[in-house]
Amino acid sequence: MPANVRTETLAYTAGNQTLVSYLAWDAARAGTRAGIALFPEWWGSNEYVKRRAREIAELGYVGLAVDV
C-alpha cells in the first residue's frame, strides 16, 4: 500500500445489527473527492474488496468497502 493511502474501519448500526465497513483514501490529496462504494460478493467483506478500496484511493477517489 502506498504511504499516502490511509484506511479506517467504520462501525455503525442498522436496526439491531452492527456493521463494519472499510474506508480508504489518499491523505496526500487535498480538497473534495468523489467516493466509490464497493459491495462485496454474497459471502461478505474480505481482503479482495478491501484491496480494491485501496486501489480506488490510489486513483484519487475515496473507496468504501460496504458491509451489507
Image (spheres, rainbow, N blue to C red):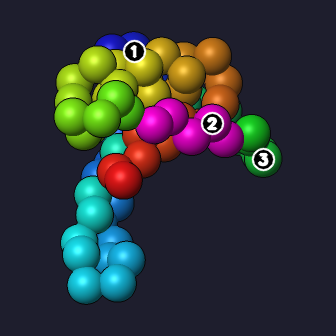
Considering the numbered disc 2 on the image, is that residue within a helix, a strand or a loop?
strand
Label placed on residue 32: 3
The residue depicted at 23 percent of the width and 72 percent of the height is 18
Label placed on residue 2: 1
Horizontally, residue 36 falls left or right of residue 68, namely right
The residue depicted at 27 percent of the width and 57 percent of the height is 20
Dot 3 or dot 1: first in sequence order is 1
The answer to which quarter of the image holds residue 12 is: bottom left
Q: Is residue 18 visible?
A: yes
> In the image, residue 49 lies at what x, y percent?
35, 26
Horizontally, residue 39 falls left or right of residue 12, namely right
Label placed on residue 66: none
Label placed on residue 36: 2
Horizontally, residue 60 falls left or right of residue 25, namely right
> In the image, residue 48 lies at what x, y percent?
29, 19
The answer to which quarter of the image holds residue 61 is: top right
The residue depicted at 48 percent of the width and 42 percent of the height is 64
Considering the numbered disc 1 on the image, is that residue within a helix, a strand or a loop?
loop
Image: 59 above or below 63: above
Label 2 neighbourhood size at 10 Å, few (<14), some (14-19), many (20+)? some
Label 3 neighbourhood size at 10 Å, few (<14), some (14-19), many (20+)? few
Instruction: Please provide the residue range marked out in magenta.
Output: 35-39
Label 1 neighbourhood size at 10 Å, few (<14), some (14-19), many (20+)? few
Horizontally, residue 33 falls left or right of residue 63, namely right
Image: 13 above or below 65: below
> Which of the two residues, 27 or 20, is positioned nearer the viewer here?
20
Question: Is residue 37 one of those drawn in magenta?
Answer: yes
The residue depicted at 54 percent of the width and 26 percent of the height is 57
Q: CA distance from mark 3 to mark 1?
A: 20 Å
Depth check, mark 2 against mark 3: the one in front is: 2
